[in-house]
Amino acid sequence: MTGKRLARGELNYPGIGSTEHGQPPEGFPCLVSQTYLGEGLAVYRRVAQGLLTWELQRRSGLRVRTESDVVVPGARVVSGFGVGPFRINAPCEVVWVHPPLPGGAPQRAGFAYGTLPGHPERGEEAFEVEIDAQGSVFLKITAFSRHSNWFYRAGGALARRAQSLITSRYIEGARQLAAGES
């Protein structure tokens, strides 16, 4: 897109970039999920490619609209889930990116995006694929957030269940990428 932003507003939470360095801001619960995906550089590179082209979000069942076909700092994305009038849109902006490096293990690749006005949460989520010195490949998802308004706070248990469901869908999408499934 040229000239017009996909989503309006600015990042709306403290601690922008915290998923890159570890500590979430005070008052923002943090969830970290790590899943084994397989062995070897080929697996690592397939998953990294999928992460950095929004494929993980698409495979998790989200409708993805973005300003860039590849993940780059500052790119805005609106992912949506639900059906018809019951669709919830979640606008975000990419806050950091780590592309895969030439060469071998260990290394990590991935990105994080933060919430923009209109998202049901306020916070940040990171998606990283890591390959360790032994060649084992893992998906790591780190998220810190809290509900953006009273409406979403009122549905707290449902919102936590939705977050757990989407995390399991991300994991399944990463497994598909690791296996080379189309």
Image (cartoon, rainbow, N blue to C red):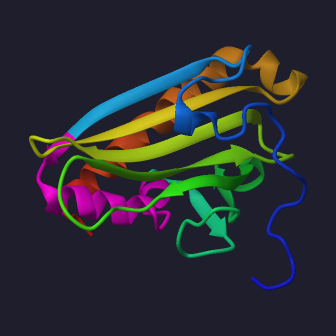
Please indicate whether residue 40 sits to the left or right of residue 54 in the image: left
**Which x, y percent locates residue 60?**
45, 50
* Viewer-proximal residue among 80 and 56: 56
Indicate whether 144 appears above or below 58.
above
* Viewer-proximal residue among 96 and 7: 96
Tell me what residue is drawn at x 52 percent, y 23 percent: 31
Magenta stretch: dominant secondary structure = helix
Q: Is residue 171 magenta?
A: no
Tell me what residue is drawn at x 29 percent, y 45 percent: 130
Indicate whether 57 appears above or below 181.
above
Tell me what residue is drawn at x 38 percent, y 63 percent: 50
Start-end of magenta stretch: 37-59
Tell me what residue is drawn at x 46 percent, y 63 percent: 52
* Viewer-proximal residue among 52 and 174: 52
**Which x, y percent locates residue 167?**
46, 35
* Viewer-proximal residue among 180 and 86: 180
**Count of numbered tags:** 0
Indicate whether 36 appears above or below 128.
above
The quarter of the rendered structure image containing the N terminus is bottom right
> Toward which corner of the image does residue 46 lie, by quadrant?
bottom left
